[in-house]
Amino acid sequence: MFLFIYLFIYLFIYLFIYYRSEYHTLLKIHRYFGDLCSHFLSRKDIMQFLKNENFDLVLLDSVDICALLTVEKLGKRFVTFLPFQFSYMDFWLPSAPLSYAPVYGSGLSDQMDFWGRVKNFLMYFHFFKKRREILSQYDSAVQEHFAEGSWPALSELLLKAELWFVNSDFALDFARPLFPNTVYVGGLLDKPVQPIPQDLENFISQFGDSGFVLVALGSVVSMLQTKEIIKEMNSAFAHLPQVVLWTCKASQWPKDISLSANVKILDWISLSFVTAHPSIRLFVTHGGMNSVMEAVQHGVPMVGIPFFGDQPENMVRVEAKNLGVSIQLQTLKAESFALTMKEVIEDKRYKTAAMASKIIRHSHPLTPAQRLVGWIDHILQTRGAAHLKPYAFQQPWHEQYMLDVFLFLLLLTLGTLWLSVKILVAVTRYLSGAWKVKQA
């Protein structure tokens, strides 16, 4: 199972990067993993081992469709972890109002004008169609490993989750209605603050009170960070009065580009330690959820360079909350990049908003880990979350959206109008006939 998850993540990232998230490529990924899932479910030794373990509860990743089929085959209760914004699940669960809950991938905030709401409405049905096509890639696995007549509907499997753990926080995400079995646990990777290595402290202190900028663009940045991009970024950093700590492998640094005097490249550094440093002025990030949550945790303004996946959506929220700004990798130039970083560092509204989000983030009475463990313990003690699940999960879509009621009232109204018109015409004719008789 772990090998399956590893292969899924690796190929997903690889193809997403090199094919720029094209939908037909995404279908190919799911078609491949549909076949791989069918092979996994046919492994009687693995399935028997899982049955013999007699788990009380299974924790799974909500984007792993094969994991859903596996727990359905085993007949086990499960809770699910969503590594993205909750809006990613609006195609699976009864949706929040489209008037202020932006569809995943729409690039909209919760404050939509008329045309924004039109776009949001149309995108919901567009992606609903795509979801059906993606799920169809697992039809062969369902038909092969489940008895005919009892094939599970993939679109309904996630509704069986006892709990939803969401890797986000309302310090970042837009406010929206949530079901009682939805728990936000953004910041699970938070660690106690520790001092940064002394050599970095010494390097930072050489530049006085200007502080430093942290640049960390994720583990897959090497696949996209071309020589031209490195050159433009390095030139931009040279225009800053701050020190720049840049996580960029020395082995990948172009030999014909001279490193700016205020830049220090590092193979790796703990984000939780560096973002907590009092001298940090800015975090240049790819917009990954864990990186953004680290910045929110410590009140650090951001400049985002999103690449793929949920990163653009995360940066939409960063911009909407005034926590920073986003720029596109394809248009990144040294001069404009330097001006953007200076703006975010010098404009106090970004730091003020970041500190406000930090207060929201820290005001929870329990840590994310305590919430997760506490709710799982609650599910184990109560033997399920039936008391937390709304009846909407059992309703057909036309009942959820009251379409049957609207249709009934519309027909009743039209019928009443039609009957009223008929009665009025009949009365008019009667009175007209009576008047003619009287005149005669």
Image (cartoon, helix red, strand yellow):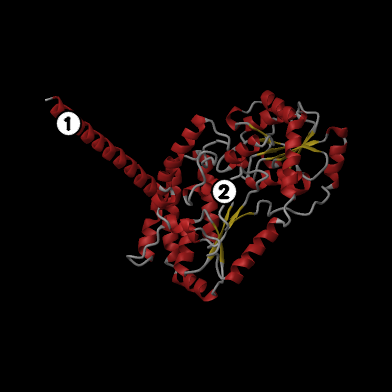
* Residue 54 image label: none
Residue 72: x, y in percent?
46, 65
Mark positioned earlier in the residue sequence (2 or 1): 2
Q: Residue furthest left?
A: 440
Residue 223: x, y in percent?
59, 41
Q: Which of the two discs, 2 and 1, sits closer to the camera?
A: 1
**Residue 185 falls in image quadrant:** bottom right
Q: Is residue 316 above or below residue 376?
A: above
Residue 368: x, y in percent?
69, 56
Residue picked out by circle 2: 177
Between 21 and 282, which is closer to the camera in this rendering? 282
Mark yes or no: residue 300 visible.
no
Residue picked out by circle 1: 434
How many labels, in total?
Answer: 2
Q: Is residue 354 above or below residue 58?
A: above
Q: Is residue 354 above or below residue 138?
A: above
Q: Amino acid at mark 2?
A: Pro
- Mark 2 packing: few (<14 Cα in 10 Å), some, or many (20+)? few
**Residue 325 falls in image quadrant:** top right
Q: CA distance from mark 2 to mark 1?
A: 63 Å
Mark yes or no: residue 65 visible.
yes
Q: Amino acid at mark 1?
A: Ala
Which type of secondary structure does the marked residue at label 1 adopt? helix
- Mark 1 packing: few (<14 Cα in 10 Å), some, or many (20+)? few
Residue pictured at 32% horizontal, 65% vertical = 148
Residue pictured at 32% horizontal, 43% vertical = 411
Residue 61: x, y in percent?
55, 57
Residue pictured at 73% horizontal, 39% vertical = 354
